[in-house]
Amino acid sequence: MTSIAKPKIVHAGLRRNGLGLTIRDYEGGMSTLCAGCGHDSITAAIVQAFFELDVPPHRVAKMSGIGCSSKTPAYFLGASHGFNAVHGRMPSIATGACAANRELYLIGVSGDGDSLSIGLGQFAHAVRRNLDMLYVIENNGVYGLTKGQFSASADVGSKAKRGEENRQPPIDPVQMAMALGGTFVARGFSGDKEQLVPLIKAGLQHRGFALLDVLSPCVTFNDHEDSTKSYAYTRAYRRAVVHADFIPSRQPITAEYAEGEVLSVELHDGSRVLLRKVSKDYNPNNRGAAIDYIRARHRAGEIVTGLLYMAEGDPDLHGVNKTVATPLNELPFDMLCPGRDALAALQSRFR
């Protein structure tokens, strides 16, 4: 993850979180992406989310594959662990890290090319395992790093910068994750940080696999009037089905109000949040109904955003495989390597 070092200048009046850190402590290197790239807005949202959650940077492992999107982890949490994997193979590395240390916050940043083409198999199995991580797809419908070919998420009828029209049906990571049994599925837009930060915070706190598909326009190759992944198209056709905020785990706060009303609710820290019911026919806890709704809105040419589906209580990778609670690097040597006699006893069971 090479990048340009960013000068660290901390203003004395900068706000500090519960750990005494400023938001500058959650930044990384200087971005080398194109000016205006949606990925940089996602980076800013990730930095803010970790800062507001009071997460110690050394307890974060950030993963990526290959592509413009996979450069992103170099631009946030410079004091955390990082691994830039082979193209499409990031989920395997994340699975190993998750199994070895369940106390880490795992965040993987990938792209539509990295996840939906060469990495499609790995992505599908990460969802199936309910791997305990936040998986962010920076989705722009194009291979920006190799000069603008259509990716697997390009919509039918969308045109490339040079006028070529895409005729292949797209792969929708949201519908795929829901069909595979994903327990947290959300979609955001890089141009809507107000919605994006709570989604990232909720995904990081979710026990299991949290997919966040973020429409992130490529300003160089796919931000023109014939693109369905441009800033203008996304702003015109996106439809936020759930307006959600994030609240850390404490005593539940309940509220009752009618459709269309706005309600101000006081949180545990004394701050307030505004709730708005925007769609009476949408239930993010009903998988079948959510899939039907997403497909119907897609046929209507709309892009639904927000927390689209969430299931609580399903066992994650640790629950299914009964992994040890203690990170492997903290176990005594005789537990990790029980010796020759234990190996011989194990082998005798298979003779």
Image (tube, rainbow, N blue to C red):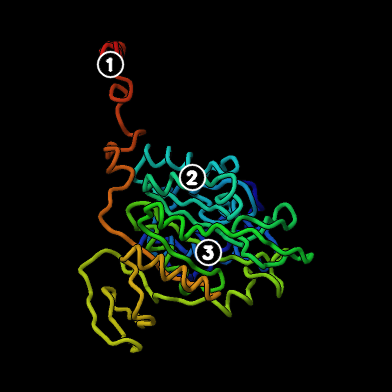
Residue behind mark 2:
81
Amino acid bearing label 1: Leu
Residue at x-position 27% and y-position 11%: 348
Instruction: Specify the farthest residue to the right.
Output: 162
Where is residue 68? Give x, y as percent.
64, 54
In the rendered structure, the answer to whether residue 5 lies left or right of residue 306 reads right
**Quadrant assignment for the C terminus:** top left
Residue 214 tag number: 3
Estimate how packed mark 1 is, as few (under 14), some (14 to 19) or many (20 or more) residues with alpha carbons within 10 Å.
Answer: few
Tags 1 and 2 touching, CB below 8 Å: no
Tags 2 and 3 touching, CB below 8 Å: no
Residue 346 tag number: 1
Amino acid bearing label 3: Val
Q: Earlier in the sequence, mark 2 or mark 3?
A: 2
Q: Earlier in the sequence, mark 1 or mark 3?
A: 3
Amino acid bearing label 2: His
Q: Let me know if residue 17 appears in the view.
A: no
Where is residue 333? Give x, y as percent.
32, 24
| Along the line of sight, the residue nearer the viewer: 220 or 285 | 285
Residue 254 tag number: none
Q: How far apart are the two marked residues, 1 and 2, measured between alpha carbons?
A: 35 Å
Against 350, residue 332 (above or below) is below
Where is residue 36? Give x, y as percent.
67, 68
**Helix, strand or loop at mark 3:** strand
User: Which mark is nearer the camera, 1 or 2?
Assistant: 1
In the rendered structure, the answer to whether residue 202 lies left or right of residue 43 reads left
